[in-house]
Image (cartoon, rainbow, N blue to C red):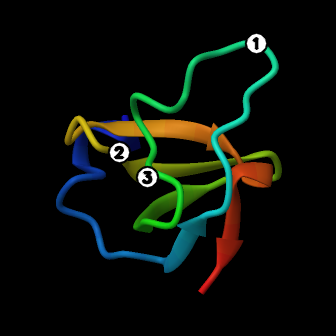
Amino acid sequence: MIHQTWHESDTLKKVKCVHTNAAKYIVNRALTEGKIYDVKNETEEFFFIIDNSGKVSGFYKDYFKEV
């Protein structure tokens, strides 16, 4: 149930969105190219960040570059 406390958890690192060109999903509503986001959790494939809607969401790492 770690996902219930992600808003209050410490930021692991910061990442910058480098593109929003998704093959399957529409991500340009949740991410802004060039914006820096706080990473709340990380897996091998995903970063979990607080997106533009204010919710914690998981996105593929290829959308980001570490700052």
Sequence-wise, which precedes: disc 3 or disc 1?
1
Question: Which mark, residue 24?
Answer: 1
In x, y percent, where is residue 12?
Answer: 48, 77
Residue 46 image position (x, y, % from top left):
69, 46
Tell me: residue 55, above or below residue 15. Answer: above
Relative to 7, 37 lies left or right: right
* Secondary structure type for disc 3: strand
Position of 62 compared to 43: left or right? right
Question: Could you say which disc has been placed on residue 49 in the image?
Answer: 3
Residue at mark 3 to residue at mark 1: CA–CA distance:
19 Å
Mark 2 secondary-structure assignment: loop
Q: Amino acid at mark 2?
A: Asp
Determine the CA span between mark 2 and mark 1: 18 Å
Foreground label between 3 and 1: 1
Pointer 3 local density, CA inside 10 Å: few below 14, some 14–19, many at least 20 = many
3 vs 11: above or below: above
> What kind of residue is marked 3?
Ile
